[in-house]
Amino acid sequence: MMFRLFADYPPVNREAWCFIMKNYKDYNLEDFLLDDSFRLWITRQDGSTSDLWERIAREYPDKKVIMQQAGDLIRSWKAHSAGVSDSELEEQVQRILETTTSKQPEQKPVTMLSRWFAMAAAVAVVGFGIGWYAWTGSPEKHTAVAYSDYVAKTSLPMKEMINTSNNIMLLTLPEGSKVKLHPKGRISYPAQFVHDKKREVYLSGEAFFDVVKDAQNPFFVYANGLVTRVLGTSFRVKTTSTNVEVLVSSGRVSVLPIKDIDHPGDHNAELLLTPNQQAIFSVKDHLISKSITNMPLELIKPDPEDGFVFENQPVSKIFSALEKVYGIPIIYDASVMENCSLRVELSHEPFFVKLDVITQTIGAAYRVSDGQVIVTSEGCN
Amino acid sequence: MQEDLIRWKRFKDGDVAAFESIIRDEFRALFEYGTRFIHDRDTLNDCIYDLFTSLWDRKKFLADTDQIRPYLLKSLRNRLLKEKERANHLTGFDSWQEQTEPEDNAESRIITSETSALRERRISSVLGSLTPRQREIIHLKFFENLSNEQISDVLEISRPAVSNLLSQALRLFRDKWQATISTLFFLLTF
């Protein structure tokens, strides 16, 4: 059979032909529609492949109908063209060229008024510069909450570890909790680690904590004006001169500014974080904002073993699967998006890539606010 | 494409001939794409006119591109969407079927002679059942033969989203197509 084929159509390279045959045998309607060379042949933009396509139709008679349909669809799509006539085109080209290329770019005269504005603007910039310098000029005021002050203030005998190496340093605290201390990080804790029903650590730099569960003795991390309180969990704390970031990997963590720790009744300042959420604390104005980590991790494996595969499912179902796996709340208007359904095949893409694919397919948008994803859409019809 | 890049640079340097050749080569493609958003020909002509005149005014500040057509399609798209927000006289894709029948050009005459009017109507109804977004992406693929990468650039969506949207549109396409074939068969048997 194959031999006869080559005998009939001698000029085709044998290997190339085998490859082609293998390819097109399993072609369905979509494959033909998406095949660049097929489309160009159908629209008569490229005649060089005629032989090949006619041969395929002959060799695979069962494909002939599909090819015919695909061709019809493409031609029909093209036939719906608006059809700009030559004279119309000429008219529009002349119209554009007349306004653009015939006139010289206008030179706007500089009036006294605009000069005055320019000077006023310059003065304003200088004034702002001075004000800004004064505001930031006394940094000592803000470091009252800094690491060394805390460590100096405490009356208990302290132990201190400093990571002077270029590698992450692995520490085990006296009660068993693990700390991965990043280079240049410093950590201090009382020699008598568990005291007054508390476990306390002072941090400068960045560290990842895996805290042993002990509900009786909560674990506190003090870092640059922010206190992070946990019972047993894992999380990362990163301090810079301006910010403290807390990223939660598992369990629940609460954070609050150190200045509010003496008012335990006031829980307004305290913020609860769940996995894949992060808090960013601004050292200067003592404000905490909640967000989502850049690369959220799967907290549980997705339900079907093959990942996120949804065959024309309502978007609400897809969102709730995402929520479950990443533990990140997704907020959207269910009534507006009632008719939005889609087919989507996702597996191990990062969380935000998954969100991109889903929202862009249905023409929606999202933003992250307060540790949640907010999806906005005008609906689908 | 190197050719595009050279032409674009000449246009940015104020070369009128290069500018004119870009308008001549791209006007029709822009107009076709535009009719997928807006049906009033005069308004569309105005939008394309605004696009080119503003390109000329800002030519010194434009980034280089070696993909003139996708670049212009994207610019026109953004312009049309802005226009849509501003005034509500854009009808959107949804009136596809109300569009006047295509002009009696050579292509459609060939189709009508090859196939029955019934078949032509069937295709129209399949195309008409797609969502605006699906029709837009199919236009870029079928009419403009753009690559997925170029489409992702024009629509400003990620490449995985392009292939997902495209496969979704084509699957729907196929399903509707087969559905119309079976109804046809049903009609013919009676």
Image (tube, rainbow, N blue to C red):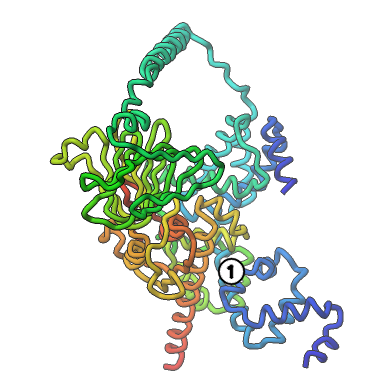
**Is the residue A370 above or below the residue A261 in the image?**
below
In the visual, does A160 lie left or right of A8? left
In the image, B154 versus B161, the foreground residue is B161
Q: Which residue is mark 1?
A: A74
Query: Which residue occupies 43% across, 88% down?
Result: B187
The foreground one among A117 and A248 is A248
The quarter of the image holding the N terminus of chain A is bottom right
User: Would you place residue B35 above or below residue B43 in this image?
Assistant: below
Q: Secondary structure at mark 1?
A: helix
Q: Position of residue A378 (x, y in %)?
A: 33, 54
Amino acid type of the residue that numbered disc 1 sits on in the rendered structure: Ile
Q: Residue at x 56, y 58 (%)?
A: B140
Numbered disc 1: what chain? A
Quarter in which the C terminus of chain A is drawn: bottom left
Is residue B39 visible in the rendered image? The answer is no
Residue A348 to residue A220: above or below: below
Residue B152 image point, x, y percent: 55, 54
Which of the 4 image quadrants contains residue A308? bottom left
- Residue A128: image quadrant is top left
Q: Identify the residue at the far top of this view.
A: A112
User: Is residue A147 something one can see in this rendering?
Assistant: yes
Count the numbered circles shown.
1
Judging depth in this view, the residue of A157 and A233 nearest the camera is A157
Residue drawn at x 83%, y 77% as measured from the top left:
A13
In the rendered image, residue A244, in percent from the top left (x then y), is placed at 37, 38
Q: Position of residue B101 (x, y in %)?
A: 49, 64
A304 is higher (above) or lower (below) than A143: below
Neighbours of disc 1 within 10 Å: few (<14), some (14-19), many (20+): many
